[in-house]
Image (tube, rainbow, N blue to C red):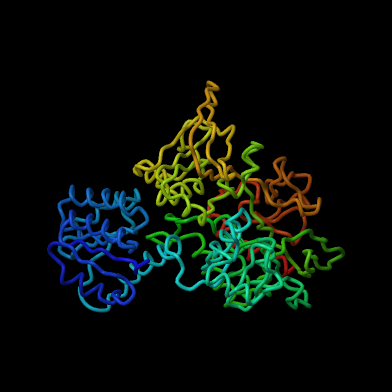
Amino acid sequence: MGAPAIIIASANHPTELSEAFARYEREYDVHLVSDEHTAKSSAKDLITQGHPVALLVIDSDHDQEKLYGLISGTRKVVPTARRLIVSHISRFRTDSPAFRHAVAAGKVDALLLMPQGPRDEEFHGAVGELLNEWNATVAAPVVENVRIITPEKDALTRELLDYLGRVGMPAGVHHPDSEVGREVLAQCPEDEGRWPIVSSLAGWCGHCPSVRALANQLYGRPDEIDVDEVVDLVVVGAGPAGLAASVYASSEGLSTVCLEAEAIGGQAGTSSMIRNYLGFPRGISGMRLAQRARGQALRFGTRFFTGWPATGISPCEDGGHHIVHTEGGDVHTRSVLVSSGVNYRRLGVESLEELVGRGVYYGAAMAAARELAGDHVVVVGGGNSAGQAAIHAARFAKEVTIVVRRPDLSATMSSYLIDEIRWNPRITVRGSTRVVDGGPDDVNQLAWLTLEDVGTGDQERIDARGLFLLLGAAPECGWLPDEVLRDKRGFVLTGRDIPRERWLEDVPPEDLATTVPGIFCGGDVRAGSMKRVASATGEGASVVSSVHAFLGR
């Protein structure tokens, strides 16, 4: 595989763009062409020669019809490449409104002002973000922080890869007979034959039976981290709400511990690209957002325990403190934020449950999408997570079908995602439809699905190699004590949603307070929450003032 390529198409400003992209020539194969025909043929030639195309840079000086033809044509040739329109300062004012819709609809990833001289770091910061996301979601890692050795990429191996992708850790899978495989097996011969074997740059090497075991090896178990004092706040769940609370609480001097059962970022961490989050005009992946927030919280002093879920809370009595229990140890705390999030509901089709990890996935499973190049993929779900998963899968799959029970997506998905899906020629939406059956091929991988019209009952069998299930929310709060009141669906009640007979002295609890003093709730697990990243972040930040008030009392 050759170096990834950057193709620049410009008829009138080749000197300016050539000088601007000279800094990338050490690590990228930079090609400057003058017209759309040459750009398309160059992309085809590079792919044939083993050079993946990472970025396509298009000067807005092209005729608009030809420019859109170039965008559409290269998408068919290199669907995984990022696309950037650059506009000279003499045209930028008129180009901005003309191309705004193209950016909003996802036809291109960004519109930038062409650099006017050296060290235009605002421009290069945006280019760096585009290349960073391409490297994280498409490129094979140059340096593998984790190596997985196995004779076949089974369901567990795919779960490990998905987890490593969510925590931003480059990884590779190697056969035991490969050069890398033999090297790793020489380090831990006692585990040979027990697959998969995992080796990390941190020095650990051995058989890995589960995602939790991998998380424990990478981050340590809770009982291996010394928390011998009563802390001010324990945050249960490191999704957007928990991460925001960790940042704000620790920055304001509260001793803060965050427990995460699996991957930092929660479900939001699986989003390939969040385009409507404040402050990121070109979008940001859920993984990047989560890792930045974790680093910010660590800087202020939050301690993270990753790999063991909370198993219960012993509420305080007579003014004492709460005890949050995990299988690996207890944490004593004056207050608790429950932000454990939700899981995707199960489809309930037995034939497909047996294929989970072999073409059937709950969640976006970004790592699995790469393996479905040229195949048909079905995404079930009508929320933003499903839309983002479909757009990401369409970079690899030949065809993506979104299946929803509702007539369309308008009631459940953000408008910007609907527009992007509508424009993408690889994605179709089938409303009033559900998946009722499916089955494997000769090697026990998903091969076909049966779709049913929810109105007429008519059924159709289709070929499909991937099924991604994003079916809505099942709250993760069965571990909570009965004193924490929940609604009939299992979501935690807070504030004025708590029945009046549970109010103290006929005064409603604070907005994010539960029925137990000192235990608060935020994010998707809270009854009535918006199920959006920004709203969860806001709840996590705002709960800190309530924690301060409670501790003050």
Q: Is residue 389 above or below residue 335?
A: above
Q: Position of residue 506 (x, y in %)?
A: 76, 49
> Quick check: 533 left or right of 546?
left
The reply to whether residue 181 is in sight is: yes
Task: Depth check: give the residue in front, 141 or 475.
Answer: 141
Q: Quadrant of the C terminus?
A: bottom right
The residue lying furthest to the top in this view is 456
Q: Quadrant of residue 87?
A: bottom left
Task: Depth check: give the residue in front, 1 or 550.
Answer: 1
Q: Is residue 161 above or below residue 420?
A: below
The residue lying furthest to the front in this view is 177
> Quick check: 512 left or right of 293?
right
The reply to whether residue 548 is in sight is: no
Q: Residue at x 65, y 67 (%)?
A: 215
Q: Position of residue 135 (x, y in %)?
A: 42, 65
Q: Position of residue 147 (x, y in %)?
A: 56, 69
Task: Depth check: give the residue in front, 245 or 136.
Answer: 136
Q: Residue at x 49, y 65 (%)?
A: 288
Q: Quadrant of the N terminus?
A: bottom left
Q: Position of residue 479 (x, y in %)?
A: 77, 54
Q: Is residue 172 above or below residue 27?
A: above
Q: Residue at x 20, y 52 (%)?
A: 67
The residue lying furthest to the left in this view is 12
